[in-house]
Image (cartoon, rainbow, N blue to C red):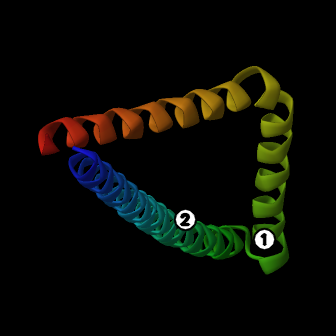
């Protein structure tokens, strides 16, 4: 009888070790998955941001050259583009608290919860 209890206790210890090892492996794989998704998100967002930035810069340069041609002077063309940016900066500065910050906060929260919902759907489909 004592021998049977010792065997049951050994089996229980082995099961506990197996459970802990499985849990550790699951946690490691989960963290790798989250890290890879985060890295992929950062890379794609950075690529999109760089492409938009380059398009914006070339568009600005093109506008400045066009205005220079229309106004007959490089100084006037690039000066007009600089004034446009100053005007845009002032508009953003005065509207940021009322509209822009709220829109960015709402966009960020919505994006986070959409990703969370997508993850939950993926988890449900796996089960």
Front residue of 96/41: it is: 41
Q: Nearer the viewer, mark 1 or mark 2?
A: 2
> With respect to residue 80, does 2 lie above or below?
above
Q: Would residue 66 appear left or right of 80 to someone viewing this image?
A: left
Q: Is residue 74 above or below residue 77?
A: below
Mark sitting on residue 78? 1
Question: Circle 2 is placed at which residue position?
Answer: 49
Residue beneath the point at 70% across and 24% down: 99
Q: Position of residue 82 (x, y in %)?
A: 82, 61
Residue at image position (78%, 31%) is 96
Question: Which is more toward the observer, 1 or 82?
Answer: 1
**Residue in the picture at 48% in, 30% down:** 110
Crowding at dot 2, Cα within 10 Å, few <14 / some 14-19 / many 20+, comes out as: few
In x, y percent, where is residue 97? Answer: 81, 26
In the picture as drawn, the residue positioned furthest to the top comes out as 98
**Other residues around mark 1 within 10 Å, as few (<14) / some (14–19) / many (≥20):** some
Q: Is residue 40 left or right of residue 60?
A: left
- Horizontal and vertical percent position of residue 20: 40, 56
Local secondary structure at mark 2: helix
Quadrant for residue 70, please give it.
bottom right
Q: Pick the quarter of the image with the C terminus.
A: top left
Give the alpha-carbon distance from disc 1 to disc 2, as whole Å. 24 Å
Q: Nearer the viewer, residue 22 or 27?
A: 22
Who is closer to the viewer here, 32 or 23?
23
| 1 and 2 marks in contact (CB < 8 Å) | no
Q: Is 36 left, or right, of 14 in this rendering?
A: right
């Amino acid at each position: 009888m004592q021998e049977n209890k010792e065997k049951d206790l050994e089996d229980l210890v082995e099961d506990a070790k197996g459970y802990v090892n499985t849990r550790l492996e699951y946690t490691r794989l989960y963290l790798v998955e989250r890290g890879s998704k985060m890295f992929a998100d950062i890379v794609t967002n950075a690529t999109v941001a760089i492409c938009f930035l380059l398009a914006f810069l070339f568009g600005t340069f093109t506008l400045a050259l066009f205005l220079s041609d229309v106004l007959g002077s490089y100084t006037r063309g690039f000066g007009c583009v600089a004034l446009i940016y100053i005007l845009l900066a002032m508009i953003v500065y005065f509207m940021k608290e009322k509209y822009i910050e709220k829109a960015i906060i709402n966009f960020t929260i919505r994006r986070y919860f959409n990703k969370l919902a997508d993850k939950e759907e993926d988890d449900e489909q796996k089960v």
